[in-house]
Amino acid sequence: MYQETILQHYRSPHNFGPLEGAQLSGEESNPLCGDHITMRLKVDEPSGRIQAVRFEGDGCAISMASASMLTDTVSGMDLEHAKALTRDEVLGRLGIPLSPVRIKCALTGFVALGRALHPEPGAVAGA
């Protein structure tokens, strides 16, 4: 069942494509598998909720499915809750055992999201 869900998210990823007016963005690459994911977010300033989240990139089925599932998870979430997500929560959503190499694939979108939510000091958000 979980493998079928992963294939569905890979073939028809949720929230895939550009996001006009994004205030936050982050990206990550996994050279071992050729994965590259960019996450973009729009945030409602007064409430601190994620209004929209979309991702772009390409990669293996695990990285694309994980990024798709992650966007479903954080859409509508408040920023503090999104910042508190753990790698184990992300991996748990996939529901399958992963080798160490595949764990890196599964976390590519998570790392990109983290870079969007925690920009480096001196970095311009959304740049």
Image (cartoon, rainbow, N blue to C red):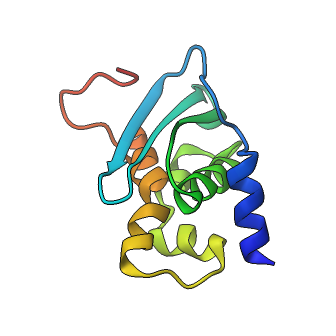
Query: For this rendering, which residue is in front, 34 or 55?
Result: 34
Q: Position of residue 47 (x, y in %)?
A: 64, 33
Question: Residue at position x 42%, y 42% from top?
Answer: 117
Position of 53 with respect to 85 (left or right) is right
Height in image: 38 above or below 9?
above
Image quarter in which the N terminus is found: bottom right
Q: Is residue 15 left or right of residue 127?
A: right
Numbered disc total:
0
Answer left or right for 122 relative to 14.
left
Quadrant of the rendering where the C terminus is positioned: top left
Estimate the x, y position of residue 118 in percent, counting from the top left: 34, 43
The answer to whether 33 is drawn above or below residue 11 in the figure is below
Q: Nearer the viewer, residue 16 or 112?
A: 16
Measuring from the top left, give residue 112's x and y in whole percent: 41, 45
Residue at the top extreme of this rendering: 21
Residue at the left extreme of this rendering: 122
**Residue at 43%, 82% in the rendered image:** 99
Q: Quadrant of residue 36?
A: top left
User: Nearest the camera: 117 or 48?
Assistant: 117
The residue under the point 31% across, 60% down is 32
Please provide percent x and percent y for residue 6: 70, 64
Please name the residue shown 44% across and 62% down the image.
105
Q: Is residue 72 left or right of residue 21?
A: right
